[in-house]
Image: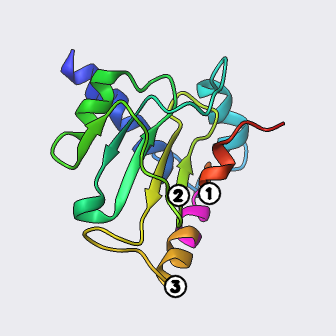
Amino acid sequence: MKTGIAALLLLPALLLIGGGCTEDLPEDQAIDYQEDVQPLIEEINPSNLVRGSCNMIATGSHCQDYIGSIWTEQAMRLQCEGVGTFSLGTCPYSENGGCRATAGTITDNVLWSYPYGGEPITGENVRYEAMACNAIEGVQWITPEDLLPQQ
């Protein structure tokens, strides 16, 4: 059982780094995130409701909100174990913003950045963190307001 859960926890990391995708493939074999991967992991009923969080602000000035349906309480606890404090609530409000990975999919999550804590992210470092986030396919820098329901 733990092996299966561990494999599920690795899925977001593989998606973020493009695991299994290479740019050396012929065009007819290349994998495109938007066309090939996202449809396989899309949520049936997408929501921006947070299922739980992992607070790592004290040590690393980040907090992760788990949104997608793959994030069961057990999966979130395992993901957070040894790195932060798990909660069924949301992360604190972030003035910096955060990096949202695979929005609208079963692995949807946001890694929020904070100007306080163990390694404060301030000034130009916020801009660099946003640039690094936006450089990854399927990932986007957002503000907390971006998670509010659209009217």
Does the magenta run of residues contain 105? no
Read off the residue under disc 3: 124
Residue 98's disc number: 2
- Which amino acid does the dot numbered 1 rest on? Thr
Visible in this render: residue 40?
A: yes
Residue 46, percent across and down?
65, 25
Does the magenta run of residues contain 133? yes
Residue 61, percent across and down?
33, 64
Q: Which residues are magenta?
A: 131-136
The answer to whether the residues at label 2 and label 1 have Cβ atoms under 8 Å apart is yes
Read off the residue under disc 1: 143
Decide which of tag 3 and tag 2 comes sooner along the chain.
2
The residue furthest left is 82
Q: Relative to 128, is 59 above or below?
A: above
Q: Which colour scheme appears in the figure? A: rainbow
Q: Residues within 10 Å of mark 3 (few under 14, many from 20)?
A: few
